[in-house]
Image (cartoon, helix red, strand yellow):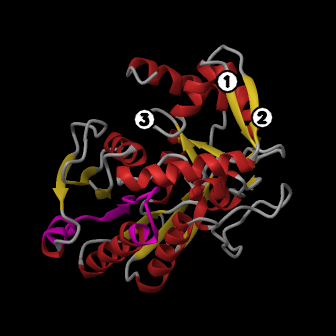
Amino acid sequence: MKKIIITGSNGFVGSSLARKFSWEKFDVTCLVRFGSDTGLIPKECRIFRVNYNNTAEMLEIIEGSDILIHNAASTRAMNWKQFKKANIELTEKILNICNSTKSLKQFIFISSQAAAGPAQDEKHPKIESNRCFPVTMYGKSKLLAENLIKKKAEKSWTIIRPVSVFGPGDKDFLHYFKLIKKHLALHIGFKEKYMNLIYIDDLMEMISKTVGNKKAYNQIFFASDGNKYTLKKFIESLSSALNTYSITISIPEFILYSIALTGDIFSIFNKRPSLINREKIKELKENFWLVNNDKAKNLLGFKPSGNIVHDLETTYKWYKEKGWI
């Protein structure tokens, strides 16, 4: 039985990884910080509450495992110092520990499309070999973490860059569901927005195909369902999944900047980043968040379902069952 360790196991993607590999009969160890809510982690998984700065403890936990998936990260932070600490320095610490182990064979890093930045236009989605131009501090921190791995990893590594991920357990897309349920949809600016999406089960299937797969060693992969969506199409699909209608309101970017500035000011007093902030606006104002997933399909045999209405329906049912909506 292969032994796998997952950092940041308590969140949406991390708990889904724990569930996926538990189903696949891996010996799964979940690492979470003290005070984290572990409610989404399957009961059959081993959970360690850890201080990532305790190198000796971390080495003792990781030694004996075959695969480590480094998923722990911050997607929102108050400033660059916090992003650097959570996404770069933590990655380096864990990487150094992994390099010291005898048993570990593969280091898998869950990065982000944000590390690559947006595509130049609708007809030229990003491929893995393109130069990266992140537009946010989060994206920059993920790219610098990737560069650390490529430079310092002594084990075989795999870097996965998911596009926007939705599914049961996600809290970011939950806001869209709640708006649509109220028959409202928001469109940023007046130009068409293009994007890729991936359902959580498809992302899990793709990551699974990289585990222990020599074709995935020392490779970077975009994770997408391969379909190109406009924001308008996504709104229509979500409305259909909820069996309702919605009225779309276009918000000029300058108004959004004002909202984001207000959010940033409040975050100073709340000591935590707001959902809508100036960094988030940098992402929202881009028109082409598009990638090409041919590499994953050709090298890994990845076959995403890409049935967005069905997947949104499944997500909606889960939200209702859990009382989230």
Characterize the local packing of mark 1: few (<14), some (14-19) or many (20 or more) Cα atoms within 10 angstroms.
Answer: some
Residue in the foreground of this view, choosing between 17 and 1: 17
Secondary structure at badge 1 equals: strand
Q: Disc 2 designates what residue?
A: 232
Asked if residue 162 is positioned above or below residue 252 in the image, the reply reads below
As for residue 6 lying within the magenta part, the answer is no
Residue in the foreground of this view, choosing between 114 and 97: 114
Q: Which residues are magenta?
A: 57-83
Residue 302 placement (x, y as % from top left): 60, 51
Distance in Å between CA atoms under marks 3 and 1: 22 Å
Q: Is residue 24 left or right of residue 186?
A: left
Q: Residue at x 83, y 59 (%)?
A: 121
Q: Disc 3 designates what residue?
A: 169
Q: Residue at x 36, y 71 (%)?
A: 85
Name which residue type carries label 2. Lys
Q: Residue at x 43, y 52 (%)?
A: 267
Distance in Å between CA atoms under marks 1 and 2: 13 Å
Mark number, residue 184: 1
